[in-house]
Amino acid sequence: MMNQNMLRQAQQLQAKMAKVQEELKTLTVEGTSGGGVVKVTANGHQEVISITIDKEVVKPEDAEMLQDLVLAAVKDAIEKSKVLASSKLAVLTGGMKIPGM
């Protein structure tokens, strides 16, 4: 009986985790750099959805700085997306670390 109960609980947890994974795809975070002149939006799957660059920083002489700002904003968005995913999954697992999650 104990094994069937554990199997049922594992199946329920798996179903809940699948639901959270789907939800994470719809949730977004925004990373910024340069005081907000570059914004990157990512979803809970660490996928970059959009990049917005304020027109004031798009000058030919600023191209190298703009590249650095975009890179910093992407890194910020991805890090926030990882935190979002971890917090959502932690609710299901009670903080328990599950390999591959």
Image (cartoon, rainbow, N blue to C red):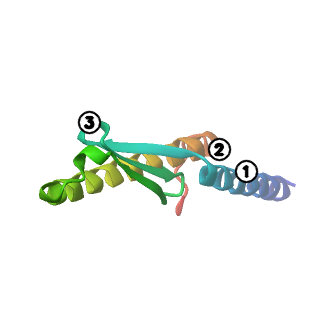
The reply, left or right, for residue 90 in relation to residue 29 is right
**Amino acid on which the number 1 mark rests in the picture:** Lys
Where is residue 36 shown, x and y percent of the image?
A: 31, 38
Q: Residue at x 38, y 44 (%)?
A: 31
> Which of the two discs, 2 and 3, sits closer to the camera?
3
Where is residue 77 shown, x and y percent of the image?
A: 40, 49
The Cα atoms of the two marked residues, 1 and 2, are separated by 7 Å
Label 1, on which residue? 16
Q: Does the CB distance between marks 1 and 2 fall below 8 Å?
A: yes
**Amino acid on which the number 3 mark rests in the picture:** Gly
**Amino acid on which the number 2 mark rests in the picture:** Leu
Q: Residue at x 23, y 48 (%)?
A: 57
> Which of the two discs, 3 and 1, sits closer to the camera?
3
Residue 91 seen in this snapshot: yes
Which residue is at the far bottom?
A: 100
Q: Secondary structure at mark 2?
A: helix
Q: Does the CB distance between marks 3 and 1 fall below 8 Å?
A: no
Residue 83 seen in this snapshot: no
Q: Is residue 70 above or below residue 80?
A: below
Label 2, on which residue? 92
Between disc 2 and disc 3, whose residue precedes? 3
Q: Quadrant of the C terminus?
A: bottom right
